Image (cartoon, rainbow, N blue to C red):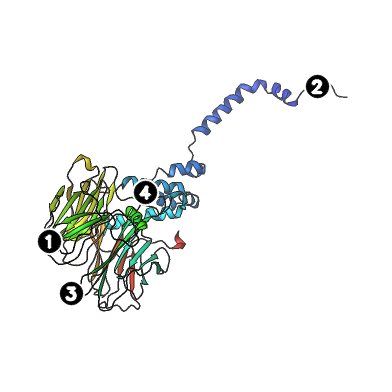
Amino acid sequence: MQTDRDLIPSSFFLFWALRPFNGFLCAAWKLFVRRVRRQPKGLLELPLEVLTEVLKLLDWRSVLHLRQTCTLLSDATRAKSIWLSLFHAYNACHPCSPLNPERPTKLYQSQELEYLVLRRLSVEILGKTQTEFSPARTRRFPTGDSGVGALTLISGGRWLLTTSDTGSVSYYDLDTQNPVKRLLIPEQMEDFPDFSHGVLMAVDVDNESALLSFNLAMIMVRTACHSTPTQIAQVWHFIAFGVATPGEVYVPCYVALVDWAKAGLQNQSHPASLSYPRMIIYYPGIPDKVQLLPGDRLLVLSEEPDIRLYDLTPFDATTSIPPVDMPTWPTYPSPTWKSEIPHLRRDSLSQMFLCRHTNTLRLVFNTLHAVYGLVIPGNALLGQAPNLFRLMDFSVRNGPSFSFGYNSAIRHSRASLHLLDYSWPDGNPPGPSNVLTLKFDGDNRMERISAFDEGSGRMVDDLNDSTSTTTLLPSSSVLYEIFHIDDAQC
């Protein structure tokens, strides 16, 4: 039979039995809690999400050092959020030459972001601390029998574009173990054996696009003795670019600026017509390098030798093609800025670097004795003049032009490859200039065209040269990499 006592919980009797000791138990419990709270916790005891937030406060060296301590911290340092933070931190310190991924960063894996950051940092450290270097990896790959008339590395260093003298364009994926030649554009001009052929190529990468996107322009020239050269200009995608007309010294030279979007509309109504709209800027001399700038401006390097900056707003578009033999000399427009530079290497000019933090446009070029930086105000309406800076001293003789990045460049001579490292007056990281030299093993090559990508530290040297002491059949190129991680190390 159940009594009233059975209905009372046993905990009630325990409470009353320990009531004389309640004050002591409460004091002991509070002391225990205080000691536990005061006891510091190590990194290994932190929750993973808290540990990750702590590691995001470290620089890349500290992250790599911490990785070597134990398995738990090694795994923690591989979190994507850590390397995404380091990726953005690097770009914040290098606004003029940031790392430009070819797809949104959310689509990158952690090890891919780590590779991009460490590869770029290794190039910077090597350029500042060494005078000679040995590439981490050297690879040779065939370029085919058609030869290479021009080549370039797309920003990021993964894609190599090569162009033959007859206009065929091929691409190589340098991230693969054995790069394979793949045709991008077939031949655009027939190869005549008794004629000389040449090609110029320009590539403009759209850094505002979420996915890798670029425009490509080509000018193909076929020439025979005592005949008028045949030129074919092509633009893939929409782009405006400059064209210099070759010819004898008595033929006035000019730069033709074409809006290919409008030209495409014109061609729809008049197929194969050459009477598309263009702006004609007559130039006193041969414009060797032409660069379009934001704000309707044009920069020209010429044989004078000088650099000139033009405002394009006063020029009207026309559909008339200037005659080859003009009865009178044209009127030459006045530049908004001009600088005569002794011993200017007029065929060497870098791409344009947009520096948002200073609202300036920057380019690099060289003379026979030095490397210069040109800083142009981003807002053309302010009327401020550009500034020239001597970035470093480096003497060269005549030969192929440099391949420039924002803080580094390469130059290929007969027996070596030079990697130049320089800093801008307001640059980050600051430091003295330096030259690294890679000597070829007994191979006295002709000075050939080369390509260089500063972000990846990759250099491509075309070996399609019959005078080279290295026998390579078929023609080939060599890829030098300053930084490389094997798949097993990733």
Residue 292 can be seen in this image: yes
Which amino acid is tagged 4?
A: Glu
User: Mark 3 sits on what residue?
Assistant: 226
Which amino acid is tagged 3?
A: His
Are the two marked residues, 4 and 3, in contact with CB atoms closer than 8 angstroms? no
Q: Position of residue 177 (x, y in %)?
A: 42, 67
User: Mark 2 sits on what residue?
Assistant: 5
Seen from the viewer's position, the closer of residues 115 and 446 is 446
Q: Position of residue 342 (x, y in %)?
A: 11, 58
Are the two marked residues, 4 and 1, in contact with CB atoms closer than 8 angstroms? no
Q: Position of residue 363 (x, y in %)?
A: 23, 52
Q: CA distance from mark 4 to mark 1?
A: 46 Å
Q: Tag 1's secondary structure?
A: loop
| Residue visible at 43% across and 44% down in the picture | 55
User: Mark 1 sits on what residue?
Assistant: 327
Seen from the viewer's position, the closer of residues 303 and 345 is 303
Q: Position of residue 141 (x, y in %)?
A: 37, 71
User: Mark 4 sits on what residue?
Assistant: 208
Upstream in sequence: badge 2 or badge 4:
2
Q: Residues within 10 Å of mark 2 (few under 14, many from 20)?
A: few
